[in-house]
Image (cartoon, rainbow, N blue to C red):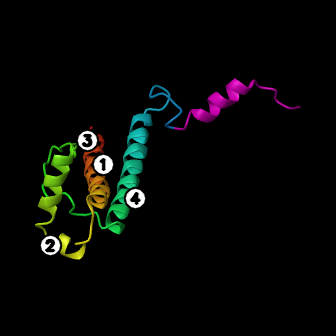
Amino acid sequence: MINMASPSSSITSISKGLPILSQSTVNPHAPLGKWLLTTSSLVFGMVHIGGVTRLTKSGLSMTDWKPLGSRPPITLDEWTVEFERYKQYPEWEQRQNMTLDEFKYIFYWEWGHRMMGRVVGLVYGV
């Protein structure tokens, strides 16, 4: 004879062992599983963004390092100052025909990569 259990009871029995779908009272390892999945996903994203950053040669487009982070330039004057500062570094020798818009593109990749690193560190630490 076929067991005609209700669909909700079969879903409950399936989700008991899955850390994402279960509560910590049912599965005491659920918080650790969620943390591992979250941090490993963030590290995967970090590697991906880092690869794109390197492929676009965006690395070192930010000329200063502030451990707590900073906002990117917003006004045209701020962008001009940052672009002129970039021209003082050896990376400029390889890309002397770069425009301000191209610089903004590589700057945002590097800025995003650094911000993602901070997020990964914060989530890992918490």
- Percent position of residue 72, x then y: 22, 46
Disc 2 vs disc 1: which is toward the camera? 2
Q: Which residue is mark 2?
A: 90
Q: CA distance from mark 4 to mark 1?
A: 11 Å
Q: CA distance from mark 1 to mark 3?
A: 10 Å
Q: CA distance from mark 2 to mark 1?
A: 25 Å
Sequence order check, earlier mark of 2 and 4: 4
Image quarter for residue 50?
Answer: bottom left
Which label is found at residue 48?
Answer: 4
Q: Which residue is mark 3?
A: 122
Disc 3 vs disc 4: which is toward the camera? 4
Badge 3, how many Cα within 10 Å: few under 14, some, many 20+? Answer: few
Kind of residue sitting beneath label 4: His
Describe the element under mark 3 as helix, strand or loop.
helix
Sequence order check, earlier mark of 2 and 1: 2
Residue visible at 73% across and 27% down?
7
Describe the element under mark 1 as helix, strand or loop.
helix
Magenta residues (range) = 1-18
Is the C-beta separation of discs 4 and 1 under 8 Å?
no
Q: CA distance from mark 2 to mark 4?
A: 26 Å
Residue visible at 13% across and 49% down?
66
